[in-house]
Amino acid sequence: MTAQRAAVVSGGTSGIGRALVEGLVEDGYGVAFSGRTRERTDAVLADLNPKRRCAVGVTGDAALAGHVTALFTAAHQAFSVWPSVAVICAGHGLPGTLTGSDPARWEPLFRLNLLGAMHQMRESAELFGQVPGDVRDLVVIGSTVGRTLSEANPVYGATKVAVHALVESLRRELCAAGVRVTLIEPGFVTTGFQAAAGYDPEWFAGIAQDQGPLLQPADIARIVRFIVQQPPHVHIDDVRVRPTRQRV
C-alpha cells in the first residue's frame, strides 16, 4: 500500500473513531487505526479495503504506553510515509455520581481516558518531532462535560477536565514547532458509547426526544477533517459542538 498522506486514529472501530477513519480515507489518507479486538478491526477493514488498500488495523489496549507508537509504525510500514495527523479517540464512559457510580470502575476509566490519553499525546508529540513537514495535527476528542459540570456522570467528566487542561498545555508547548494540537468537545452524540458504558437507555432516549436530533459520528468527523485541511498558518484549536437543542 502507498499513500501521499497518512493518519492514525486510536479507537477507530466504532462511533466517532470509525467515522473519522472512513472520512480520512475518503480524503485520501492512508489510515492506521486501533481497536480492542481483531474481530472489530477486521470488520472495519472488510468494509474499507475491498474498495482500495487504504487502511490497516492494529489490535491493542489504548490505555497502555506504546499504543500510538504502534499505530505510527503500522502506518509507515503500510503506506511508506509517516503520519501527519493523529486523532486520540479511544475512551469509555461511566454513569453515576461520585457516590452513585461503581468505584471498581474508577481506575480502569482513568487508565484509559486520562493516563492512556496522556501516553498517546506524549508519544504523538515525540513522533511528530521526528516527522518533517510544515504542519502536523494532533486532535483529541474531549467532551462538553469537560467544561460544563454534569450531575449525571461527574467521574467521567473529571477525566475530560484533566484531558482538556493537558491539551491546551501541549498546544502551547508544541505550536512553535508547527504541531497543531486541537481539542474537540462534542455534546450528545448517538453512538454505541452509551450502551457500552452502561448508561440508562431510557434516560438517553429521553435526552434524544427532548433535545434531539442529536449529533451523529459523521458530524464530528466532518469537523476534524475541516480542521486538518487548514493551511499551515491557520489553527482552529478548540471546538465545542452540540446538538442545536442541547441546553448544557
Image (spheres, rainbow, N blue to C red):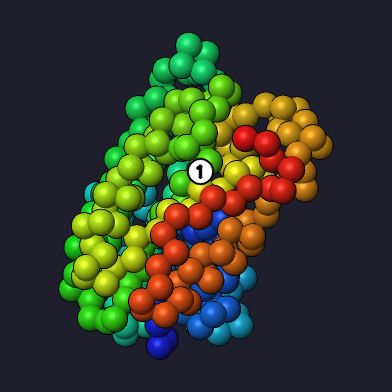
Residue drawn at 46 percent across, 32 percent down: 157
Q: Report whether 52 appears left or right of 238.
A: right
In the rendered structure, which amino acid carries the disc numbered 1?
A: Ser
Question: Which SS class for mark 1?
Answer: loop
Q: Can you name the residue that lies furthest to the front here? A: 233
Q: Report whether 227 appears left or right of 64.
A: right
Residue nearest the observer in this picture, 22 or 221 = 221
Pick the quarter of the image with the N terminus. Answer: bottom left
Residue 99 position, x and y percent, is: 48, 11
Task: Look at the image and tell me whether residue 33 can be seen.
Answer: no
Residue nearest the observer in this picture, 238 or 76 = 238
Q: Can you name the residue that lies furthest to the top here? A: 99
Task: Look at the image and tell me whether residue 23 can be seen.
Answer: yes
Pick the quarter of the image with the C terminus. Answer: top right
* Number of dots carrying numbers: 1
Residue drawn at 58 percent across, 37 percent down: 196
Mark 1 Cα-neighbour bin, 10 Å: few <14, some 14–19, many ≥20 = many
Q: Report whether 228 appears left or right of 167.
A: right
As drawn, 142 above or below 230: above
- Where does label 1 land, which residue? 143
Residue drawn at 42 percent across, 17 percent down: 103
Q: Report whether 92 appears left or right of 81.
A: right
As drawn, 2 above or below 56: below
- Quarter of the image for residue 208 reads top right
Residue drawn at 48 percent across, 77 percent down: 229
Residue 170 position, x and y percent, is: 26, 54
As drawn, 95 above or below 59: above
